[in-house]
Amino acid sequence: MKFRFLYLIYGAIILLIFDSCARRGRPTGGEKDKDAPILISAEPDHKSTNFYTKKIRINFNEYIKLKDINKQLVISPPMENQPIITPVGSASKFINIKILDTLKENTTYTFNFGNSVEDNNEGNPLEQFKYVFSTGSYIDSLSISGTVADAFNKKADKDISILLYEVTENYTDSIIYNERPSYVANSLDSIGFELTNLKSGKYLMIALNDANNNYKFNPKIDKIGFLPDFITLPTDSAYKITLFKEELPFKLMRPSEIKKGHIYFGYEGNPKGISIDPLLQQTEDFKSTVVFEKELDSVSYWFTPIEADSIQFKVNHKSFIDTVTVKLRSKEIDSLIVNNESRGTLNLRDTFAISTNIPIHKINKSKIKIIDKDSVNVNFTTSLDASKMKLKLNFEKKYNNRYKFNLLPDAIEDLFGNVNDTLNFNTSTKHPDDYGIINLSLQNVENFPIILELIDEDYNLINRIYATENQIFKFKNLDPKNYLFRVIYDTNKNRKWDTGNFLNRIKPEKIIYLKKPIELRANWELNEDFNLK
């Protein structure tokens, strides 16, 4: 028994040893590190004056890593040559900065690292970390803050640059196109911004969606926002800057032949009012049409017949007049393709449409039939949109019905004389209970006329109403989904939204969005208020 007892004790000790070893091999956990890195020293010191060196070393209390440093780091005033920041891609307890520019005299510089400095283990950011120094005898300490918004979209873009230009005796508005600003900040992922360590003075403030990241305004690719007046520092005011895309002056690009009888005229700006006239002796059977290709920023010129090697055009647009010559090399004409634009379910608010890849020249209505679910012929009318590439069949649509569309050969003839083969399309409408209704009341409208637009959450336009007086706006036959409303104040009464212009100090027309989406379900009728104040 004694030996057996000792054996049991020995076995228990062995088990405890193995259990202890097993426990030692596993992480015991503990509280997660939530502390951000801490700056412990810098060479030269943070907020040094009479700064003259080209090398900076910033030391932290733990290993750090730099995340998105190229995006996050903002240096103000901006430097012509970006400094070299190391190490990048590996953990260290320091950051080295090598300055490549010649520093300005008596200037306070701010290296704003944003949230790029993180601890290596948990990724806790040292938020809005800045290193500041001055080449003068003191640190400038003034600041200014505000928010950015978008003139047309509900949400502002991210990563907006806020630029301050000092207004001196040599100031001109062209400075934003050609020179770097006096100070710069960035909104990063928020709509708020702050510029710090500024000196007193008079400034122009603008905001840029700076596609080239060069702090210079390029109207072709950048959005811009500006304050109507110069600002004077110091100030306690907070500012809101609304960005917009300027409309470019009209400019004709070099035209090119796409296929036989089809030429693209590229352009910049607004092509409305353009006229394109061939300088040739036209025969009686000569046909042509112009189609605006908005997605391609081009105008399609379709024509037939022509057998020459080249054709000369006279292009007019307001005060713009030019003559261009296009070489004609293509021998092939596109084949006619016809597509159903209203596949599946047809909403009672929509019109059944057929699209073509070539402008339509003739429609033979007698060769088109619409039959409902009871095999009854449906009366209809036809119409072409401005492009002549969309044929609309207008008829009285009824709930919970099915429609068959039959197009016999030669129902459609395009510009080149191509005709369709036999085509059959089907569509259906829903039951009334499958739709919803929104009755909208507007409150605190500043002035009329307004453009009221119903859009979905993807900003697709559902309906548009031009209103010259207040009323209850009724939107029927809406599919169940979330909707938004926006109101455009049509200041110049031209029935469209107009953007702004920096040089002319024209602000874009005001747009107000309903703050929260409206959830509409099937068979619901909602009464909603939209307060524009």
Image: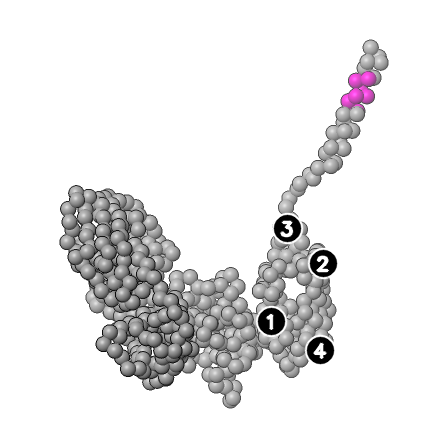
Q: Amino acid at mark 4?
A: Tyr
Residue 75 shows which numbered tag?
1
The stretch of residues the image draws in magenta is 7-13
- Marks 3 and 4, Cα distance to the nearest angstrom? 36 Å
Q: Amino acid at mark 1?
A: Ile
Above-or-below relation of 456 to 17: below
Residue nearer the viewer, 118 or 396: 396
Mark 2 or mark 1, which has the lower sequence index?
1
Name the image quarter holding residue 287: bottom left
Q: Residues within 10 Å of mark 2 (few under 14, many from 20)?
A: some
Image quarter of the N terminus: top right
- Marks 2 and 1, Cα distance to the nearest angstrom? 22 Å
Residue 423 seen in this snapshot = yes
Image quarter of the C terminus: bottom left
Q: Amino acid at mark 2?
A: Ser
Mark 3 or mark 4, which has the lower sequence index?
4
Mark 1 or mark 4, which has the lower sequence index?
4
- Marks 4 and 2, Cα distance to the nearest angstrom? 26 Å
Q: Which residue is mark 2?
A: 92
Q: Which residue is mark 3?
A: 122
For discs 4 and 2, the disc positioned in front in the rendered view: 2
Mark 2 or mark 3, which has the lower sequence index?
2
Tell whether 191 sits left or right of 472: right
Q: Amino acid at mark 3?
A: Glu
Q: Which residue is mark 4?
A: 52
